[in-house]
Image (cartoon, grey):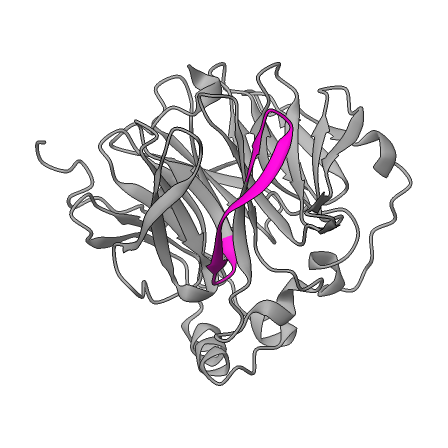
């Protein structure tokens, strides 16, 4: 392996470009080879954005009567909250809904049905993210069993888990995570990488042929210094990620080193949140005080464009999508192949 293409690389804020407008909670973004973007949207569905900038919201059929609350904190905990997205093999959109606590599937015309809402006879919890693998299995993260997820931002709550949907059957394959968030598989699908938001680190587990997991370990720093949300691999093997609320983009190199690539932090608010977290006294007000100026609460990174060198930043409080060029291409998602 030659020199890391991220050596010496940092994102210049003034070089950022933007696409989309009036978006609501564009947390997760899917990119297609033709340049089309699909962004989760809190109005209950996704926004399709063409390369030229034209956009259209596609609302889930059963959510058309949804009325959005005006209370800022409630906007992140109530109603429909499409969160993680993935393309099904037929092109439909799989949606992990962080508000309705369901795994849903939506056609590109908006027709929606629930795939999973329980496991072992109980409500599944806060379905956060989904990932489809080369065997057409669906990996899911459930952040917490607490209905109001803001109350789970605590150093003492460790009830997140990973589930696997295989041929229509769901089962828990790993549990005991500190607010499970995004997950990714490496290029050979040998390891599953799991964000533990409140652990401030990433764990990984070895993937066996039957979908069982073993050999759990922390990947990279034990404490990256802030709450992690989204992750994505590039083709060199760097694992990119976002620090949510402190608004940073970082990368963990194959050697395990942490590199900060973009920093839009509000350090005073972030420090207050950190102290409150350590004392188990986090409040919605402290969280909402955090965030930078680019797209508050960085939530995800998505590689797109024909060469997979354009990086799009998803966010929880932004209304448009920032993007920049990377010196290295992203690892193609399963729908890209």
**Residue 308, quarter of picture:** top left
**First to last magenta residue range:** 164-180
User: For the view shown, which residue lies furthest in the right direction?
Assistant: 65
User: For the view shown, which residue lies furthest in the left direction?
Assistant: 2
- The location of residue 90, given as percent across then percent down, is 62, 14
Residue 282 lies, with reference to residue 314, above or below; the image says below
- The location of residue 110, given as percent across then percent down, is 78, 25
- Dominant secondary structure, magenta: strand
> Which residue appears at 57% of the width and 78% of the height?
282
Residue 18 lies, with reference to residue 282, above or below; the image says above
**Residue 49, quarter of picture:** top right
Which one is in front, 115 or 208?
208
Whether 177 is among the magenta residues is: yes
Q: Quarter of the image for the N terminus: give it.
A: top left
Res. 196 visible in picture: yes
> Which residue appears at 48% of the width and 85% of the height?
279
Residue 186 lies, with reference to residue 33, above or below; the image says below
């Amino acid at each position: 392996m030659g020199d890391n293409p991220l050596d010496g690389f940092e994102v210049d804020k003034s070089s950022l470009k933007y696409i989309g407008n009036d978006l609501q909670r564009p947390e997760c973004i899917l990119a297609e080879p033709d340049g089309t973007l699909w962004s989760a949207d809190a109005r209950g569905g996704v926004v399709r954005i063409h390369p030229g900038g034209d956009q259209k919201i596609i609302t889930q059929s059963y959510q058309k009567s949804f009325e959005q609350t005006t209370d800022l904190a409630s906007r992140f905990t109530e109603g429909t909250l499409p969160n993680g997205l993935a393309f099904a093999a037929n092109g439909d959109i799989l949606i992990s809904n962080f508000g309705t606590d369901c795994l849903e599937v939506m056609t590109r015309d908006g027709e929606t049905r629930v795939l999973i809402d329980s496991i072992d006879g109980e409500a599944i919890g806060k379905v956060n993210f989904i990932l489809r693998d080369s065997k057409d299995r669906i990996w899911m993260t459930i952040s917490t069993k607490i209905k109001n997820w803001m109350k789970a931002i605590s150093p003492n709550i460790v009830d997140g888990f990973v589930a696997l949907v295989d041929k229509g059957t769901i089962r828990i394959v790993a549990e005991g995570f500190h607010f499970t968030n995004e997950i990714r598989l490496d290029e050979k699908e040998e390891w599953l990488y799991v964000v533990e938001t409140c652990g401030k680190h990433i764990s990984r587990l070895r993937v066996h042929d039957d979908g069982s997991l073993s050999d759990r370990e922390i990947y990279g720093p034990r404490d990256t210094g802030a709450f992690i949300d989204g992750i994505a691999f590039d083709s060199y093997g760097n694992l990119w990620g976002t620090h949510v609320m402190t608004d940073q983009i970082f990368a963990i190199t194959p050697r395990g080193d942490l590199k900060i690539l973009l920093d839009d932090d509000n350090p005073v608010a972030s420090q207050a949140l950190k102290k409150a977290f350590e004392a188990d006294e986090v409040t919605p007000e402290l969280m909402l005080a955090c965030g930078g100026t680019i797209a508050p609460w960085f939530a995800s990174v998505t590689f797109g464009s024909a060469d997979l060198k354009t990086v799009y930043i998803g966010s929880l409080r932004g209304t448009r999508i920032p993007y920049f060029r990377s010196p290295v291409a992203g690892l193609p998602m399963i729908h890209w192949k």
